[in-house]
Amino acid sequence: MSSSDPNPDSPPRPPLVTAAAAVSGLEALALFAGGAYILVATLTGRPDGLTQALTGGLTLIGLGLIPLIAARGLLRCRSWSRGPALITQLLALPVAWTLVTAKGALLPAGIALGLAAVAGLVLLLHPSTTTALGVRRTNA
């Protein structure tokens, strides 16, 4: 264990939690890259609406912080991190659908995003992940 671990006596992080963190981290990187692309294209080109393009790029970069923070929390097995990670996966599904139905060059991006979102949901909802994160089931 490294010295940055909050509790050296804690059990090792399950591989599924690590995989869920990786999915969230990759989604964060994709959002950052998309935002940076829009900003660079805006500053080097002639956008239809400068304010709208800048806002779009900065929004994507800001939204990338959510899965990035969730990934860090998952790597530290923090129970709070599951919520933002789940929300990110759920929001990615309609975006993936939109990209897939747009066809053309966006089709592969939509397929990749859809697969990542479904994989992230499966990993985050797996019983070993919920146990490792200390999420308890409630009986209704």
Image: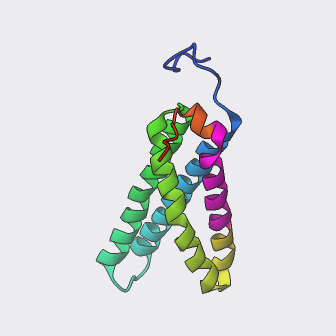
In which image quadrant can residue 54 be found? Answer: bottom left
In which image quadrant can residue 14 be found? Answer: top right
Part of the protein shown in magenta: 112-128
Q: In the picture, which quadrant includes the N terminus?
A: top right
Q: Is residue 10 magenta?
A: no
In-front residue for pair 126/23: 126
Residue 18 appears in the picture as rendered:
no
Residue 80 appears in the picture as rendered:
yes
Q: Is residue 87 left or right of residue 18?
A: left
The percent position of residue 62, horizontal first and vertical second, equals 38, 57
Q: Up-down: is 24 above or below 60?
A: above
The percent position of residue 51, horizontal first and vertical second, equals 29, 75
**Picture colour scheme:** rainbow
The percent position of residue 37, horizontal first and vertical second, equals 50, 67
| Residue depicted at 67% across the width and 55% down the height | 119
Q: Up-down: is 6 above or below 127?
A: above
Q: Main SS type for the magenta part?
A: helix
Q: Up-down: is 48 above or below 55?
A: below
In-front residue for pair 122/74: 122
In-front residue for pair 18/140: 140
| Residue depicted at 40% across the width and 83% down the height | 46
